[in-house]
Amino acid sequence: MSSKTSLSTRFSKLLHRSSRRHNAESIDENSSGLCDICGTIGFSDGGDDRREAFSLGLLGDIKRRSSCPFCKFVLDSMQDERIIHMQPIEHYDTHEVRVFRQGPKSFSIQPLPSFSKVLFESEVKGFETLASHGQLDFNKVKSWLRACDGAHKKCVPNEGPFNVDLSFFRCIDVKDMCITPIPIVSQYVALSYKWGECKPFLLLKPNKDDLFAKDGLRRNWDLIPRIIQDAINFVRSVDCRYVWIDQLCLIQDDDDDRGTGINAMDLVYEQAYFTIVAGSGTDANSGLPGIREGTRSPSRQVTSKILPGINLVLRHTMQDLVAGSEYHHRGWTFQEYYLSRRKIIFIDDTIYFKCYEETWQEWEDGLGVRPDPTMERGQALHKLSGDVYHLLGQLLNKYTTRELKMPTDYVFAMAGICRRLADYAQCSLLLGIPVSAFDWFLLFYPNKSGLRRRDIFPSWAWSGWTGQVYYSYGSGDVSKWTAASTWITWYKRETSGTLTMVCNESECRTSRINELFGHLCDVSRTEPSWELAKEQSKKPYTVLQFWTISANFALRPVSQEEGEKAMWSSGLYWTPSTHELLDKEGLVCGFVTLDDATSTRTGHEAAELILLSLSSQKFQGAVGTDPSYDSTDTGGRFFWVLMIEWDGRVAERKGIGKIHRNALASALDPGVSWKEIALA
């Protein structure tokens, strides 16, 4: 028997060892329907003189004891669809399940999230409103708002002025029941929700005059989705007058009005008095539970009567509930949630109030408040300082996990955040990329599941891929890195054929080209060729045109164990689509990770790589490459490279990686070349 198995066996025996001192309990738990194991937990005695940890055995064993009310409760808990589980329930059939006593009437179940708790229903103040299907307490909401107004300076919206076109801004007047223009510095509420598949009721050119007139919404009330009806009633019930809702406050068939509003979406949610977060339901007809009588139900909770007078309920933190909701996976709600200073979150048949200073909840259950990075990043977005590019990279790491019904909205749904950061950096945007750090934002890396091509956007942009991308290349100053480590003069060719420079920094970059590559080949050409225009015009998006070094190297798949050991000091991580790069001598000189994990490559297949920039990480020897590529007098740094493939005279990105700078002299035939690239 292995030492690991032996320890596990001894621990299980220790946990199952029960005391004989409790045979005279007021409630005989062993004869109450609880199994022999659960009968030792001691639900009825407040945990006095009882163990702190209990093994329920393997999950497969628990399934066979499902007639036990607590075993069934555990099974229901591990299949609770309200949260994200790390593994499907079948994964735990051969894993031990444990219960830990957190207090007299509080337990946790392993492997549920560590912040989730099993509580006696009597310990959850306000939970009884579910049984009565009652409305939420509007006075409690008003008291939260008053408390925040009086004490939390961070939660107060800005007074302006704002360097954005706000001609689009209008709100629903819940008193006069119409849509009306108001200044954005007015007190208004915003709604953040998922449209879903239900039929929307939209503000359009043909109906705007009717909806702008008094009682226009009342005349069309039956056409309005329930979530919007409930939001209007909620705003009125907490003594506010205006609410902003996208369906009814942007003219949806007016491209100028809708586009102007989308570009300023960050301000709409940042300036709101508070935001209603509709975390429950799947679409706009789901409503806001608790606004109407009978819209909250205990049937959605995981509860169990395990002994006479003892009912248990499984409680999760607000963060886990939001993360498991369909709301959380919608692309449009990303910036809405991050930028809102105060949120009233409807989820799990209850409400939470969350601002920059406090978290309050309708049902007081004693669960701890988890750290919330969304609030930290939201505050950073409100008061920008320093290098904002890493902040945008972190946000894109999260945003690219989201889904949108319309793929064409992928850049629009981040437009407000991107515009705000570009304004701070005093630069323009190209497909959601600040052009002052253009080189850095091309260096996105696929996660271990890989990416899939979204061909309505270019392959060089984060928007050109479905799946999570990563920007995690150290904490150095991106502006300083750009100034010291880049050489490409970027040009962009629009679908109209117009050719312009992306960012005017060509003079300093030209001198760096000669320093880095002048000894290898003729690098004098940096101006774009006009004859490529015809090929590029076939693409429905912006194509990059530029000159850089091109070279061929062989690919060889690398195992996880070898890859993780070899890649750590190069600042990269292994994925199933990672390959070693081999020079003409068969020596390892770098790594490349294919973006599309389904791409198949045979061993030692040649691939074309183009150099993008210098990497900030220095080569330290023990990374799996040949010793001949150890540090050099010039710093021993890597080059960032893109793997590309050509379709006619236009190329697409296929992977990203790094190659040692000394490897260029050992490229596969015909060696390195200074080459013009049209990258779609």
Image (cartoon, rainbow, N blue to C red):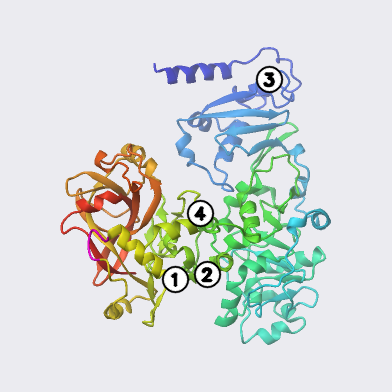
Q: Which residue is mark 3?
A: 50
Say above or below: 92 vs 490: above
Q: Position of residue 297 (x, y in %)?
A: 69, 51
- Res 315 visible: yes
**Magenta extent:** 518-522
The reply to whether callout 1 and callout 2 are in contact (CB within 8 Å) is: yes
Residue depicted at x 74% and y 15%: 24
Q: Which residue is mark 4?
A: 477
Measure the alpha-carbon separation of dots 2 and 3. Answer: 65 Å
Q: Earlier in the sequence, mark 4 or mark 3?
A: 3
Measure the alpha-carbon separation of dots 1 and 3. Answer: 69 Å
The secondary element bearing badge 1 is classed as loop
Q: Which residue is mark 1?
A: 503
Residue 332 lies in the magenta-colored region? no
Residue 643 or residue 39, whichever sits in front: 643
Q: Which residue is mark 2?
A: 427
Q: Position of residue 399 (x, y in %)?
A: 52, 58
CA neighbours of label 3 inside 10 A, class few (<14), some (14 to 19), many (20+): some
Residue that protrudes farthest toward the top in the picture: 20
Residue 447 or residue 22, whichever sits in front: 447
CA neighbours of label 4 inside 10 A, class few (<14), some (14 to 19), many (20+): few
Give the overall secondary structure of the magenta segment: loop
Q: Amino acid at mark 4?
A: Asp
Q: Amino acid at mark 1?
A: Cys
Say above or below: 668 vs 567: below
Q: Quadrant of residue 243?
A: bottom right
The secondary element bearing badge 4 is classed as loop
